Amino acid sequence: MSVPRLMLSSLAGAGRFCVLGSGAARWKSVRAWNRRGLSDLHPQLSPSQGFRDSPSWMPKNRSEPRSYITNPKLATTLVQILQKENRNRHQLFLECNPGPGILTQALLESQAKVIALECNRTFLPHLQSLQTKVTRKLEVVHCDFFKLDPRNSGIVKPPIMLSETLFQNLGIEALPWSEDNPLRVVGIFPAKNEKKILWKLLYDLYSSTSIYSYGRVQLNMFIAEKEYEKLVADPQNNLYQPLSVLWQVACEIKLLHVEPWSSFSVYNQVGGPKKSKNKESLEQINKQNMCFIQLTPLQNLFTENLTSVNYDIFFHMLKQCFMKRHATLMDHLQSLSPVNAVAILKEIEKDGDMKITDLYPEDFKLLFETIESFRESCRWLFDDSLEDIIL
Amino acid sequence: MSALRWGRGASGLRRALWPAGPPGPLAEEGALSGVWGRRRSLSASPCEQDRRKDWGHAELLEVLEARLRQLQAARVSEVTVRRPRPARLPDAGGFQPRRKAQKGGEGTAPGLGGHWAQKLDQEKWAMQRRKQRLQAKLQVRAQQLACEHRLRMVPQLLSAPLAERLLRWEQETPRSPWEEQLARLLREAPRRLSCEAERAHEAGGAPARLETQQQRLLAFLECCLLSGHLPLAHHVLVTCHGKWRQRRVLTLAAYNTVMLGWARKGSFKELVYVFFMVKDAGLTPDLLSYAAALQCMGRLDQDARTVQRCLDQMAQDGLRLQDLFSSVPLCQEEQAALLQAVHKAQPTFSPPLQPQPEPQVNTSPLLREIYAKGPVSYLPSCTCLCGSCRLLFQQQLQEMATTVTVESRRRSCLTKEVLARCEQLSAESQLLGGRAGCGPGSSPWVAHRQERRGGPRPGGGGGGRRAGLRPPAPDPLPCPQVAVPCLPRQYWETLGAPEVPHEQPWPLPVLVQLGKRLAEMLVEVVRMPGSLAAPQGSCSLIPVLYHVYSFRSFRQIGILKPHPAFTQLLATAAEHTLTFEAAEVPMLCPPLPWTSPHTGAFLLSPTKLVRSVEGTTQHQRLLDSCPPAELHGALDALTQLGNCAWRVNGRVLDLVLELFAAKGCPRLGVPAPPSEAPRPPEGRLPPDASPAQKAELRRELARCLKVAREMHSLRSDALYRLSLAQHLRHCVFWLPHNMDFRGRTYPCPPHFNHLGSDLARALLEFAQGRPLGPRGLDWLKIHLVNLTGLKKREPLQARLVFADEVMEDVLDSADRPMTGRKWWMEVEEPWQALACCMEIARAVRAPDPAAYISHFPVHQDGSCNGLQHYAALGRDSIGAASVNLLPSDVPQDVYSGVAAQVEVFRRQDAKRGVRVAQVLEGFISRKVVKQTVMTVVYGVTRYGGRLQIERRLRELSDFPQEFVWEASHYLVRQVFNSLQEMFSGTRAIQHWLTESARLIAHSGSAVEWVTPLGIPIIQPYHRDSKVMISGGIQSLTFSHSGDTSQRPNTLKQKNGFPPNFIHSLDSSHMMLTALHCYRKGLTFVSVHDCFWTHAADVEVMNQVCREQFVRLHSQPILHNLSRFLMKRFCSGARFSAPSPSLQDTLRSVPKTGRARHPARFLRAGGAGGVAQGPAARSPPGPLLHRGLRPEAGEALHLLLQLTLPRRPPCTIV
């Protein structure tokens, strides 16, 4: 990593951009194949692409460090994984923040159609030059996938977009929930606010809005190992939390690949004062792996009692349950619902004395549906869940 | 962050909700746990500590006993060992000796048996000794345990000689009486107050935390005293005293409290114990201590010698015997006991009568006229309104019940069944001891109050404040019989009503903890039948309250929610009464005159002169340290505002009630009932509905919920107001006033007052009538036109003409408000306009309109009051002209002026080719800039200003929306520039004030100043101090910005100073006007800068208002301020090295005389205006164009929003 990086810096000239990550001292710790892979990167950055004159894809004025796939080897691996289980080789991929476009190229080479959503303006010219090479297979849009459909109805101007406009422009049709996934999203969760984005996606998913109004969109994302562990945590794990339950109820979660952090490149704002601080945090990140996971919404997520109208009550129920982790199911039933707790327990065939966090995700769903199925006028003790605002 | 700790609280939730054991006597439990908690650490959660401690003891005992058993077993083993069979050893116990024994056995030859035996003997001996030691230990421990459970009585003294003496005395009790001891103790008491305490006091209070702890302990002791747990209080005192670390929390007041308790009981021995401790702590007994001692002697009938010695000692300490009776709060019975003791020694002594305090005179030059003797015509007494004041006073004693029940105006939809049940219930409750509907006589509170009368009270909110009731005082208002007319306060002072020591508020953490405990109890205790349909007794009880959470983004907020069945029950029962705190209802007799920062307004309910956020003490401290005479202006003005008698405008009330009972009318400000709320679409969506449909449904649901909630709160607000209005319909009532920290005045009763919306104001009129006089009718008409908001920019004459033009509509509105042409409904302030129409109709139809007795209040509003003060301070002639401070025929409008100025700048820029300026062509109007101009005075920043303008631009439909951001940015800059141009002095002053505040805050102090009327002001903005109370149902955090121990919040201090300063000027002006109007016999009330009086008196009031404005600004206000700030922040020991920049800034008062000589500048306007006299041809008062009303309502709301001290953000996390 270090050698090309140093070259990068020298190529780009003084302080045009700042590349962070493993320093020269870490050189020895990088594995051999990795080194080779990074050396392979060099040709990509050759002056022939006009890089030296105008580092067009280098970010500027971005304080938020983003990681990008710059390793062609990794890109190839990913494409293999993605296409392995794919019947339709011409499937549509939506790539978030491709950056230098290494993965984009690999995908295109595998006959897939790609829509590149890039939020960083500086990468756009480079991506657009790719577009001209492969006509009709690549679309480049200046858009931030993770900020689609802002919830607070803030200003909508690029890179913030409405999914409706975006998909309309791209000519993507909505598929019913029962159909196969209409498109597959590939990308990396931004390291800084993974949790927020995961929550936003959950709200979108359960309410079938934003990208999920187009059907069961499949996400293939890199995520920090720590977050991944949270996603798949179960009652035996003390990372078990509402986020885990909600994702496990909603999606089939598959771990496709694990990659050390060091295979990614991080680009940051020009020599900002926060450099050292960032470095520290990156040092920490460096130690972990990135997991490439697949989140496929389940076909049977929505039932008669859990719909995209009342999902928020489900959310609220979970949050409240995990608020008092060590209380028993009985206690929680008493403060969740005015419906007779004994009747509910009988229905879900659980013991009132068990700890709430001993319930598995599907148990929570069952519990919710059971309470919802009671035909009493008032089924829940809280009624302001509509005001819960996330993000 | 603290949200993370919920888990812990939550785990105990079930335990908290359903207590396992039978409910014990709560009070005692609480008290005891309080003891344990306090003794260990003051902040620990009491219950837990208690349990843990007991548990610890039990455990220890168990362990010790086990060990004992073990040792006994070991002894047995030894016995066996002694027998010549060393190989076999029992397993139990004695590991060490056995090992040794074995070793010995193996390592030595059998021939050395003697040595062996010797060793064994030794072992045995050691063993026995150990056992004895252990047993002794156990015994001691058990004793200690027993001790722990017995309340400690004998103090542990740190001073060795003192302790020895105590011991000796105790053993010799029969021979030497305790009083000897007391006398000796008193003699030896150190002559110095603890110097640290003194220093701390000077520095403005000890460290806040310690102070809090002290207060908490004091509060606890007082509670013990009142609840009859005196031995407990004593025990706590002794334990605290005995530990060096905890002794810091003990103050003389704490000792005195316990001492007083013993004195009341007549327990001399314990009293002396406390005296021992006082001496041990190095404190000097004060008057209270002596009072307690003497009282105790009086009760015990001690002999004269002892009393005499005590008195001698008192004299030596420089304490006067008379002061015992005058400055120590004692109830009659206590006083009698005290007197009995004193009489023993000095049979001739008689307690001094209240010395007539020398009436202090206010020296403010602005108030000289008010307090000058001379011919005055004060407002006539209220006795002419409704008979005897004594009767009214009796009525107002409803406060004794602490609450007032008012019939609710909710539309009753009671079924017969419900009604029958209600009757049955009330009959039952009457049987149960006649508690329901208790009058003042039968109220349990009264007994309680009388019991507590006199003694020092634990502070806090609800407790009765005054020591005993004053005898129904003679008419507090000056009656014609009084020879020399004087102000109510002066009259009250001559009555010599005793000044009762005011209560100290409880520290905030204590309050919150108490509140939390109470809330927890509610959750635990309140139950209802699980099913209402089932017969009683057969179904289980379910809790009524639930603790649930609400999630706001990543924050969690705990909420107590009623069970839906309970809500439904309430709705079905349709409770037809509302219960208010006594202090929330207007008074039925004239309020007590304000005589000090603690005395005034309600008869019994405590009222503060300065309303402030809960927990801020600095205002009170400042007022207390201020010479009483300095406050006279404010006290008298507030008294006078409160003395205005009101009555309900019955006709308007009828109309409103009719609408209210029907479907309401949101357009007219009558909120609709919940039945009118939008209903979410019924039924479930078909399962195959598209996600978009579902999302739409969700949005609709959320919208309905939001609207329903808003409607509910509006409806409740109106319900309270209308119910109170109906309750008071046939009464004359009074609205006592107090003020905020800047001197702005507010009526105390919150729900029904003249400060509210259009509807609220229309419901009120003066109880006292005045003949309209020659010009009164014209003023009524002008007032009506003002209320319509139709002729804002016309001179008064034109308005009058307009009023005559629409007279037909006016009369129609008055006669057939709901069925006629409804002209009144279309105007800006419909209800007030309607009331005015009715008044005009009555006056016009009267045989002689000039003699018609009118009760109708006529308003006169200021035009952008803040800017007026700035313009006058800075002598900005252009600015002054635009806010009607200079003579002019047509009312000026500052907003239009600014808009015009902005337009000039825009045109220049457009010519220069600035794109935004070109886009904005034709869009710059008064409306766009108005809000920003108005709020600039109150410190709006460019950021806020831009947002305001952005909102206005978005409202313009034809404005190209993509330019909004840029245009608003541009406009706000131009508005500020224009203001700079027009009000150059204003901007300079604002800047100076801001800069001074910034530097003062930087130096670590909160900004303070004194208004021209002499009210001391301090800005209560500090960095947030967070208090977290964990444990129990959930952790509770609240942050409090008024904590003086924190550094000041520079941003708030800086941004707050200019508007607060202007408000303080504004309020000074209002108070001056009020006092002078009062002197001239006018009825006067104010809504900040909107002044009300009778139609006949409008001109007099206008004249007074103008005169006082000129008077006020003839003072060198800014120079006085500069001088004060210099003195306060750049001199004295605290500021040994004031920063030079602060000094420079404070000294460099902005230059003002840009226009003309200040006096001439103002005189020109003022004199001119006054000289014009009551002519209707032109606007009467050019100086202060009070005849104009530029959106007073809006401005008022804005001011309230912007500047009212915000409640502490009390987040439950």
Image: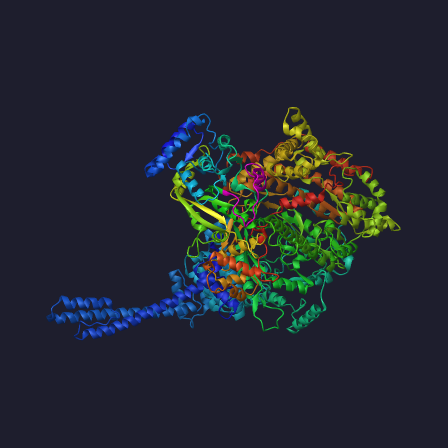
* The image quarter in which residue B1178 lies: top right
Check if residue A177 falls in the magenta segment.
yes
Measuring from the top left, give residue B773's x and y in whole percent. 83, 47
Name the residue furthest top: B912
* Residue at 34 percent of width and 36 percent of height: A27
The furthest residue to the right? B847
Q: Looking at the picture, tell me which residue is in the foreground, B440 or B539.
A: B539
* Residue B42 visible in the shown view: no
Q: Position of residue B32 (x, y in %)?
A: 48, 66
Q: Nearer the viewer, residue A270 or B862?
A: A270
Predominant SS along the magenta part: loop
Segment tinted magenta in the rendering? A155-184
Q: Nearer the viewer, residue B431 or B563?
A: B563
The quarter of the displayed image where residue B117 is located:
bottom left
Q: Taking B77 as reference, is B1209 left or right?
A: right
Q: What colouring does the structure picture have?
A: rainbow
Image quadrant assignment for residue B994: top right
Q: Is residue B1102 above or below residue B356?
A: above
